[in-house]
Image (cartoon, rainbow, N blue to C red):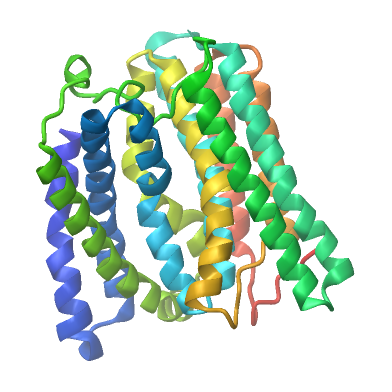
Amino acid sequence: MVRKLLYAMLVFVPITLVLEFLLHGSVSPVAIFITSAIAIIPLADLIGHGTEELAIHVGPRFGGLLNATLGNAAELIITIFALREGLLDLVRASITGSILGNLLLVMGLSLLFGGLKNGVQVFDRRTAAMNATLCILAVVALLIPSLFDAAIAQDRAAELGLSEGVAVILIVLYVLYVIYGFTSRDKSVVRDPAVPEAIPDPAHPEESHKAKWSIRMALIVLSLATLGIVLMSEALVGSVEAVTANLGLTEFFIGIILIPLVGNVAEHLVAVQVAYKNKMELSMAVSLGSSLQIALFVAPVLVFISLLVNPAQPLLLVFNNFELVVLVGASALAAFIAQDGESNWLEGAMLLAVYVIIALAFFYLPQVGGAIPHP
């Protein structure tokens, strides 16, 4: 039912194409922003579904690699266009928002609905604790260049060198994390959440191990969905400045709240659905694993992509004070909840309350000429 609704939203793809390329001068940029954002949601789901189908054919090991490269394709494409336009604050905000969304919104909804349906739910404490610890480590790694930036801000080469060095280390750590997940004999280790053996189809869990698409079909869907996201992302990013002016929204609010929701809503629904089905360990793997992918893989990769698409304005892993505070708080809360191996609906409500508070704070945070204080 959910997937049918997502596929029905594909109608917004041709609508956006018409508004952007045929009626661009006579249509409000806000309308283009809305239709392109809606269109990206089903396209992101198609990429995720196509990746899962292709991973079934190639096996779990290559499936993990596919997920590492395609699991966050929608958000990567959006941020690449933002980098090309020099919207660095928007990119950093989307990184922050994706981590927050997974740790607070997705985990919160999963705990809430899963707890209301099934009462107290249990999951493997060692696995969840390890993932939560890695999230804290990743946040600390992002803190370092932000805190030291005040001392080296006058040396542009030093700033870029520090961000690049941290990025390389994070990517290496992510590779080690994936290798450990596939080679460890500890059965408590949850495999990469996008590998078909780890995430069943919520509607047909008993059929998740069988490919429904051929390799050719999966590749065609992936290619067309990726092309669609490229076109939609160009329209979305191109209308951001007009949206901030017309609706009074800042780049930070769009990056922290809207873009992560658009790019990951389908994956979020999967986490909530499996928690509702009392598969809390799997749901925790999705929320924590997705946060790790963003912090350890997507963020550092964007540093090097920025050098290719806009070398005059490279992306530095330097976040403002507000982003640092909420990242530290979210990772700490997730670690506290994961440490006992049990969850209930009240814990989910608490996580959601924190997410709404953060959303309200960034909604009212002014941004005048990018004057957001840094450490």
Q: Residue furthest bottom?
A: 25
Locate residue 315 relative to residue 215 in the image: left or right. Answer: right
Locate residue 294 relative to residue 247 in the image: left or right. Answer: right
Q: Determine whether 41 is above or below 133 in the image.
A: below
- Residue at image position (23%, 63%) is 227
Q: Position of residue 283 (x, y in %)?
A: 43, 24
Q: Position of residue 2 (x, y in %)?
A: 20, 36
* Front one among 352 and 134: 134
* Front one among 368 and 315: 315
Q: Position of residue 29 (x, y in %)?
A: 32, 79
- Residue at image position (17%, 64%) is 13
Q: Position of residue 125 (x, y in %)?
A: 59, 13
- Residue at image position (50%, 61%) is 255
Q: Determine whether 281 is above or below 296 in the image.
A: above
Q: Quadrant of the C terminus?
A: bottom right
Locate residue 371 relative to residue 18 in the image: left or right. Answer: right
Q: Determine whether 69 is above or below 23 in the image.
A: above
Q: Determine whether 137 is above or below 283 in the image.
A: below
Residue 280 picture quarter: top left
Locate residue 54 relative to residue 122 in the image: left or right. Answer: left
Q: Quadrant of the N terminus?
A: top left
Label count reads: 0
Q: Is residue 347 visible?
A: yes
Q: Is residue 357 visible?
A: no
